[in-house]
Image (cartoon, rainbow, N blue to C red):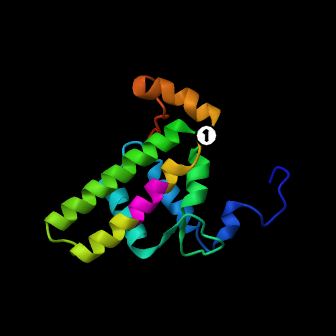
């Protein structure tokens, strides 16, 4: 555990799975996000509040934790904001197709907005600012190769 006391890491926040916040982070980091992962994000935002500070609420998405994590990693921040935008687009598509009610769409949309607001409000670090100057001119992600068994 590299100097950390047992029981103090992210894995211990929830049982038997990772926390809701970490599930959201897992989806937000995907470079070429697919329909299934966008639907997963919609379901997560439908079922869980987004709080600037979760304060131990295991059922809430901790927007502050996400924002602080991304504040020094421009690539992760960029990918996450792009994926939130794609999630919002899918929400609009589902609404237009009658797959979701206006009430639920508004509910999900407000939670996405809360996360986006928190991402924007947290001061960015020096590494973030330096990398932001380069922007998308240089790759910000690593390709994950498919393992064939």
Q: Residue 139 lies in what quarter of the image?
A: top left
Q: Residue at x 61, y 74 (%)?
A: 16
Residue 112 rendering spot, x and y as whole percentages: 40, 61
Q: Residue at x 46, y 55 (%)?
A: 117
Q: Secondary structure at mark 1?
A: loop
Q: Residue at x 77, y 63 (%)?
A: 8
Residue 62 rendering spot, x and y as whole percentages: 57, 64
Q: Which residue is under mark 1? A: 72
Relative to 116, residue 15 above or below: below
Q: In the image, 97: left or right of 77?
A: left
Nearer the observer, 141 or 111: 111
Q: In the image, 8: left or right of 138?
A: right
Magenta stretch holds residue 3? no
The answer to whether residue 130 is visible is yes
Relative to 97, residue 70 above or below: above
Q: Residue at x 73, y 61 (%)?
A: 9
Q: In the image, 115: left or right of 46?
A: right
Is the N terminus in the top left, top right, bottom left or bottom right quadrant?
bottom right
Tell me which segment is drawn in magenta. 111-117
Q: Residues within 10 Å of mark 1 (few under 14, many from 20)?
A: some
């Amino acid at each position: 555990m590299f100097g950390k006391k047992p029981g103090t890491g992210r894995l211990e926040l929830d049982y038997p799975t990772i926390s809701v916040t970490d599930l959201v982070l897992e989806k937000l980091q995907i470079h070429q996000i697919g329909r299934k992962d966008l639907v997963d994000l919609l379901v997560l935002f439908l079922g869980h509040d987004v709080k600037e500070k979760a304060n131990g609420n295991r059922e809430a998405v901790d927007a502050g934790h996400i924002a602080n994590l991304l504040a020094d990693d421009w690539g992760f921040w960029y990918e996450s904001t792009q994926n939130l935008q794609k999630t919002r687009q899918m929400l609009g598509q589902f609404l237009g197709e009658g797959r979701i009610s206006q009430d639920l769409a508004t509910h999900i949309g407000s939670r996405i907005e809360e996360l986006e607001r928190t991402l924007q409000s947290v001061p960015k670090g020096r590494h973030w600012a330096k990398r932001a100057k380069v922007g998308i001119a240089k790759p910000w992600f690593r390709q994950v190769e498919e393992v064939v068994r």
